[in-house]
Image (cartoon, grey):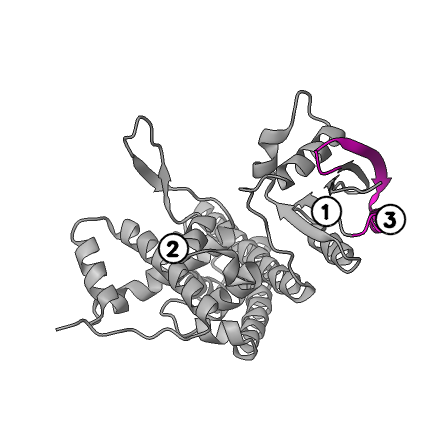
Amino acid sequence: MQLSIIGIDLGKTSCSLVGVDAAGKVLVRRRMRRDTIVAFCSKYPGSIVAMEACCGAHHIGRALAAKGHVIRLMSPEYVRPYVKAQKNDDRDAEAIAEAASRPTMRFVTVKSEEQLDMQTLHRVRDRLVGDRTSLMNQIRSLLLERGHIVAQGRARLAVALAGLLDGKERILATRIHELIVDMRRQWVALDERIKTFDAEFADAAKAQDGAKRLLSIPGIGALNATALVAAVSDASTFARGRDLAAWLGLVPRQVTTGGRPKLLGITKRGSKYLRKMLIQGARSALPTLKAGDTPVGAWLRGLLSRAHLNTAVVALAAKMARTVWAVLRHGDVYKAAPVAA
C-alpha cells in the first residue's frame, strides 16, 4: 500500500493520522502517541507528510525529512476551510491531508534547530521586558496611591525612586519603603538579564552572514536582524518583497467587491513580535531618513505632508521589510542611492 499524502493532527500526547492515495481516497486512519509517529511513517517512504505549523511540528518534520519524506507545514488558518461537518481530530487530519494537495496552498519552511533556538531566546527576552514593564507600572501605581506622581518613562521613575528611597529621611512608611526597595532590586535584576540577552544578540548578529548584512539597513539593529533571519530562513520562499511584508501583516487589508477596491488598515497577520520590532525600528530611523538626500527621504517627506506620522512609520516598516527580502534574497548589503539630479 502506497500512501501519497499523510496528514497528521498533532496533539500534546495523542495524535491523529490519515493516509490518502493519489486520488485522495483515505486508506489509513490511526490514533497514536507523538513518539510513535516517526516509526509509523517510516513504513511508507517517499510520502508527503503534512502538518499544521505548530509547537513541535518543526522537530518532527526534521526527523521525518531524514527518513526521506517530503514535509509540508501549513498555517492552521489555511487548513480550517477544509474541515468537513463536525470538528474532531480525525476530521482535522483529513483536512490537513486535503489542504496539502492543493496546488495554490502556501507552505511554511521547516526551521532548523538553530533557528528555533534563536526564536526561543527572543521569546524569553520579550517576556522579561514584559515583566519589567509590569513591575514598573506596579511601582508607579503604589507611589500614586501615596500621593507621589511619577511621569512616564524608565529614567523618570528611576530618578523618582532615588529621591524617595535614597534620602536620609524616610518619606514612605517603613514597610512600603522596604517593599519598594525590594521591587527596585528586582527591576535592576531584570535590567541585567535583558542586557545579557542584548549582548548575546549583538554577538550573534556579527557572526551570522545574513544578520550582518541586515545591519546595513537603517532601522535594523541586532534584535531585528537576528529575529528576522531566524523567522524568514530562506528568502526565496517569498516571490517578492511585498510577500514578506504581507506575511508580517504590514500591508493594507483589502475589502473589494464588485470591482471596487477598498483598502483599510494593515492586516496585522503573522508574527506580532516581528511586526512590533520593525515598526519600532522604523520609528527610530524615520527622523534621520526623512532628512536625507535619498529617494527614501524624498518619499518620506512627501508622505508626511499628506498622512499622519503613524501611517508614515508603518509604511516605512513595510518598505524595510521589502528591503530585508532584497538583502537576504540577493546576498548584498543595503546602499542608499542619492536623489538623481
Could you tell me the amino acid type at mark 2?
A: Gln
Considering only vertical position in the picture, is 221 above or below 258? below
Label disc, if present, on residue 150 of the rendered structure? none
Q: Position of residue 66 (x, y in %)?
A: 77, 60
Separation of marks 2 and 1 at Cα, in angstroms: 51 Å
**Label 2: how many Cα within 10 Å (few below 14, some 14–19, many 20+):** few
Tell me the SS state at disc 2: loop
Q: Position of residue 338 (x, y in %)?
A: 22, 74
| Residue ID for mark 2 | 152
Depth check: give the residue in front, 225 or 38: 38
Q: Quadrant of the N terminus?
A: top right
| Residue ID for mark 3 | 43
Could you tell me the amino acid type at mark 3?
A: Lys
| Residue ID for mark 1 | 49
Residue at left offset 81%, top offset 42%: 2
Separation of marks 3 and 1 at Cα, in angstroms: 13 Å
Residue at left offset 47%, top offset 66%: 329
Q: Is residue 32 magenta?
A: yes
* Foreground: disc 2 or disc 3: 3
**Label 3: how many Cα within 10 Å (few below 14, some 14–19, many 20+):** few
* Magenta residues (range): 21-45
